[in-house]
Amino acid sequence: MAQPYEERNSAAKTRRQQEDQRRMEFRRAIEDRCERRQLQAEIGDFPELELNYWQAAPATSRRNAQPAR
């Protein structure tokens, strides 16, 4: 038995939405990876920037820091 037009159209629309969503997730992953590689390349030019803030800041100054008012 053939499906009514509305059901076929709805199924096709849902399938296209799912495909679009997968494509966008893939595109975002590619863009994220490209951005991370670019940032890593820029940081590689300045080895001193590779230190994490928490590694560079003395522990006492972090504990005694006053909250912003």
Image (cartoon, rainbow, N blue to C red):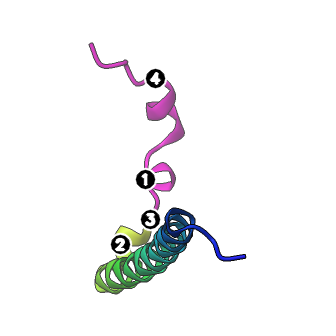
**Vertically, is 10 above or below 39?**
above
**Label 1 CA crowd tier, 10 Å (few <14, some 14–19, many 20+):** few
Q: Which mark is residue 48?
A: 2
User: Label 1 belongs to which residue?
Assistant: 53
**Vertically, is 44 above or below 65?**
below
Query: Do the CB atoms of the residues marked 3 and 2 lie less than 8 Å apart?
Result: yes
Q: CA distance from mark 3 to mark 1?
A: 6 Å
In this rendering, position of residue 49 left or right of residue 26: left
Q: CA distance from mark 2 to mark 1?
A: 11 Å
- Give SS at disc 1: helix
Mark 4 vs mark 1: give the one in front. Answer: 1
Q: CA distance from mark 3 to mark 4?
A: 21 Å
Query: In this view of the protein, which residue sits in the foreground, 37 or 45?
Result: 37
- Give SS at disc 4: loop
Q: CA distance from mark 3 to mark 2?
A: 6 Å
User: Label 4 belongs to which residue?
Assistant: 64
In the rendered image, the residue lying farthest to the front is 1
Q: What's drawn in magenta, residue-wise? A: 52-69
Q: Identify the amino acid type marked 3.
A: Leu
Identify the image quadrant of residue 45: bottom left
Identify the image quadrant of residue 33: bottom left
Q: Which x, y percent locates residue 61?
A: 44, 33
Q: Which mark is residue 51?
A: 3
